[in-house]
Structure formats: C-alpha cells, structure tokens
Image (cartoon, coloured by chain):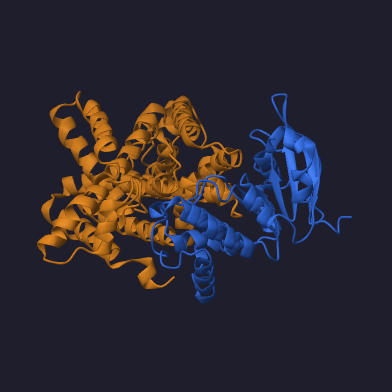
Chain colours: A blue, B orange
Amino acid sequence: MSERFILSVESLEVSFDGFKAVNDLSFYVEPNECRVIIGPNGAGKTTVLDLICGRTKATSGSVKFKDKELLSMREDQIVHAGVGRKFQTPSVYEDLTVSENLELSYPKGHGVFGALMFQRDDPVKARINEIAETIFLDDQLDEKAAFLSHGQKQWLEIGMLLIQDPELLMLDEPVAGMSVAERKKTAELLNRIIQDRSVIVIEHDMGFVADIATRVTVMHQGQTLSEGSMERVQNDPKVIEVYLGH
Amino acid sequence: MTLSSFMSRKDLIGFAILAAVIFLILPSILDSFRLNLFGKYLTYAFVAVGLALCWGAGGILSLGQGVFFGLGGYCMAMFLKLEASTPENTSIQSTPGIPDFMDWNQLTELPVWWQPFYSLTFAMFAVVAVPVVFAFIIGFAMFTRRVGGVYFAIITQAFAAILTILIIGQQGYTGGVNGITDLRTLLGWDIRTDEAKTTLYFVNGALLFVVLFIAQYVRKSKLGRLLIAMRDQEDRVRFSGYNVANFKIFIFCLGAAFAGIGGAMFTLQVGFMSPTLVGIVPSIEMVIFCAVGGRLSILGAVYGALLVNWAKTTFSEAFPELWLLGLGGLFIAVVMFFPNGLAGVWSEKIEPRLLAMLGKPKTHDAKAGATSPAGAPAE
C-alpha cells in the first residue's frame, strides 16, 4: 500500500485544550495527484497542512510520506524529505530582493557553514532566472519584495517552493485576494507546476477547484465529510447541506 | 565570494573613513590620556558590532552582552593579575604568590581553575572561548526551544544579573565588587605607561577592523541574508528547510566572541575589570550604542559606541546626576525619530544631499534608501 501512495494520513488527530481541530482523519494521496481540500471555515483544513509539515504537533495518528513518518521529524527535515508548503498569507522576505528570496530557497548550503561558504554561481543564477520567468517576475529580480503587489508576492512564494523542487507541494489558498487577471495567470501557473508532482491545495474558488483537482476531499469539523471526484462531491447531499448550499 | 560582492564601493569608502578616523584623526588631535579614553570607547564598539549582527540583522535582542564582555575581560584580567602577583611583589601577604584579594579572603592556595591562566596563550584562547561556550549554552537552551523576542531579551538580562551577583558573592575567587585591580605588566611590558597605552590603542583599532571584516563577510554571505529573512519571516525560513536554531546560535556565539575580545582589550587599556562592567546597566548601554549608531549598520555601531561614550564622559563630568536621564532620553529619541540611527540619518538625509551638492545624479542606492520601508537595511 505504501508504494501506491506518496502520502498516507491515518487516524490523524490534534486537540487544542480539548477541542479536536482534526479528528480521526485519514486520506491518501497518489503520486502526481492534485488533491484539493475544501470545506467551511474552521473545518481544520489549514491545520491538516500544519500537521503534515510539522508546524503543529499531532496528538495521535500517523503521517507517512514515502514510508517516512513525518510526525517525528523537525520542520526542516520534512522539507528536505521533499515536502514544500505555501502559507495562506504571502510569506516572503520583504527586505530582500526577488532574486535573494529565490536564492535562499535554493536547495544548497542549508547548514551554518554551507550558508557562510555559499556561492551564487552560474547554475544557481540560471535556476533563479528560470524560476523568475515561470512566476512572471523576471523583470523584478533586483526589486525588494516589499514593493511587489499582493499577487506578485504570492507568485514569489510559489517560486520559492518551485526552486526547492518538492515532490509534494502544499498550497493554502493560492488565489485568495487576487485580481481577476492575476487569478487567471495564477491558475495557468499552477496548472503548469502541478505536473510531475503531487499537490495538496486548499481552495474556496469552486471554478478553480474544478479546473485543477484530480480528487477532492471535503472536510467538516475536523473530519472527512466526502471524498472523490469533483462531480461526485458536488452531488453529495451531505456536502450540499454543510458547504455548497442549496 | 568576489571582492565586489564582499564590499561595495560605498562600503569601501565607509571603511576607509572609519580607518582614517581611528588611525589618523583621533591619534593626531588627542593627547594620550584622551586617546586612551577613546580606546576604551572602542572596546565597546566590538560589542556593538556583534549586536548589529545579532539584533539588527537577525532580530535577536540580547540585553546581556555585558556578560560576554565581562567574561572576556576577566579572562585577560586573570592572566595579568597572576603576572602581577609574583612572590616578590606579594611578599607581605600571608601566602605570597597568589592574587592580593585571595589573600585578604583567607585563601591559601591558587584555585585549580586559575592555574591555566599563567599562560598567555591559554588566556587569549579563553578570551574568545569562554564567552562562546557560555553563549552556546544559553543559545542552545533558548533557541532550540524557540524562545525568542522579548522573552529572550529578559532571560539574557537575568544572566547579566546572575553573573554580577556570582562575581560579587565569590569574592575570594573573583575579587568581588572591587573586581580584579592593580594590573601591571603583559609579559614584562608595563601596560600603564603612556607609550604602552598608545600602542594598545592601535592594537585595539586593528583588532576592531579584523572584527569588522568578519562581520562584513557574514553580512554579505548567504548567512547574512538568511538572518534578515529569519528576522522578518522565521516560519518561511524554517519551511524552506533551514534549522533556524542553529543559525541563531551561530550568530549569538559570534557576537559573544566579539564582545569577549572587546572586554579583553578593555582590561588591557583601562587596567582593571570589575562586576560593574558586566551587569544589566552596561548591557543595556551597549544596546543603546548599537541603536544610536544604527542597528543595521556595522560601521554605524562603531560610531554609536564612540559618540555615546564620548557624550557620557563629557556630560557626566558636567552633570553627573543627569547623565542617565540624558541617556534614556537619547534612546527614546533615536527609537522615535531615527529608527535606523546615525547610519540611517547618513544614508537617507546627508548622503543624497552630498551627492546632489557634488553635482552627481542621484544613485539608485540613494533613491532606494530614501523610499525604503521602515526597518529596511541601510547599506
């Protein structure tokens, strides 16, 4: 079974002072699958991503990524195992330039002395330029991230993940707060980058979800309410009841 | 790292100006007494440079840098004290050959942990190693548990208090509240003469430049950019695959090493070391030197240390009881009106005007400096 799935989440549970934010949750992600998690506010969607990437410690359960138990690993070890995470609000380094932001995510020189000795050599520059082009920021390489628009910051953070080249990419509301034009460009971008890797996306925009999802997991009160293809969950009476509305 | 990425033209000019101030201007306008005073001020610059990296770049505010300054200073003082306590010099004591304060406290034998300090090599090693080991222990305990911000500042302050109390309490081993005094020679070379003090001033200046070059290298390396990234978005750094705690421990230890060297140079130039230089008040003053100079700029930190200490000497000669109020006021004024300190005033106000006066078109750097968001690093 473990060979079929890249990520196996089993009986995952976390409680904050007795409140179970995630309660006996299990789901499995296949290689190259794009899994979208939807659900009403407070369903525990972001918490699930936090648990997988080690930001929040689980109370019980298991998260296996390619046979490695992630729950006992430190955040940076999880990243090196191949899991990348994008936050809901754009988290970029505002005081650094676009190229410096990308450079820090380049998967080399991650130890103290590695960072002291790190050289921005030609392969690094080439990779930075390549990623910058992908995320539409090749003209702003020397601009401080603080001067970017909201949408551009989101792209930059996606670019920072791309340069890491994770096998599993987790995106938390990548198109939230974007203008229509930006949203369209982002959908294009995401469609391109979700090839050749597994992706977990949290999103509310149903049109966007239908566009990218291989399968959809609907969460409600920390549990899986429904799971399957977009069509199936859209017609599931339980989902219509709690989330999609009549 | 290429030369141009290590030091931009602007940095090079800044370093050259500072070198001129320290090695040419001050020695030529000051008599040897005042020059020695400025030498003393410059020992605090070591601490301020370390703080510019820890606090300015990395966002780690330590209110206990006096601990490391003091540890470095005490290591040097222990060596000098042992050299001064020859059996001939101390023949009137009931136990000749041990430091005078030990004799006064009825110690009859040199404690074992004082023994290695007969060696100058060991003492010089200890000047850096002891503060670094202490910083490592504190840093490891705090940063791996994700203690940061205000909590970290308060804990470091507690360490400053603890060390002071410890030194004062263990009078027989440390010289107590008086400190270690009456230091005379370094390998037979009398450090109390005017010539010796002048020589030490230049040694101190040279060491400060070594420290500044190291700081510049760190700042311009990827580690320097990571520090800024950690200050602004610690979680993002963590989820880009870095063990944040290791980087914080490293920079905290580096700051401690700088402070230790400063402390040792203080002992050599001033001729004593005492717990009043270790505690909470001096530790906070050190943060003020850094803030006034501009916590984002390593050169600014040096000017901050010089200026505030010079003001302290000048004003406390005239109005001794008003100085602390003045210092507090200065700190508030800097935080409110010049958050980037002297370095910020220079890069945002003076430099663009100078360039305009010289008829040069505004450089891109100057423009970026003027429009930078608050907290942006001033180059």
Specify the farthest residue to the front. A246
Q: For residue A197, what is the image quadrant?
A: bottom right
> Could you say which is closer to the camera, residue A146 or residue B172?
A146
Q: Residue at x 21, y 35 (%)?
A: B312
Does residue A83 appear anywhere in the picture? no
> Could you say which is closer to the camera, residue B10 or residue A165?
A165
Q: For residue B86, what is the image quadrant?
A: top left
Image coordinates for residue A39, horizontal then vertical, percent: 69, 39
Q: Quadrant of the C terminus of chain B?
A: bottom left
Image coordinates for residue A240, horizontal then vertical, percent: 73, 37
Image coordinates for residue A204, horizontal then vertical, percent: 62, 44
Q: Residue at x 52, y 51 (%)?
A: B250
> Could you say which is closer to the camera, residue B343 or residue B374?
B374
Q: For residue A83, what is the image quadrant?
A: bottom right
- In the image, taking residue A176 as reference, residue A78 lies left or right, namely right
- In the image, taking residue B42 as reference, residue B152 lies left or right, namely right
Specify the farthest residue to the right. A1
Q: Quadrant of the N terminus of chain B?
A: bottom left
Figure check: B217 above or below A241: below
> Could you say which is closer to the camera, residue B279 or residue B142?
B142
Does residue A33 appear anywhere in the picture? yes
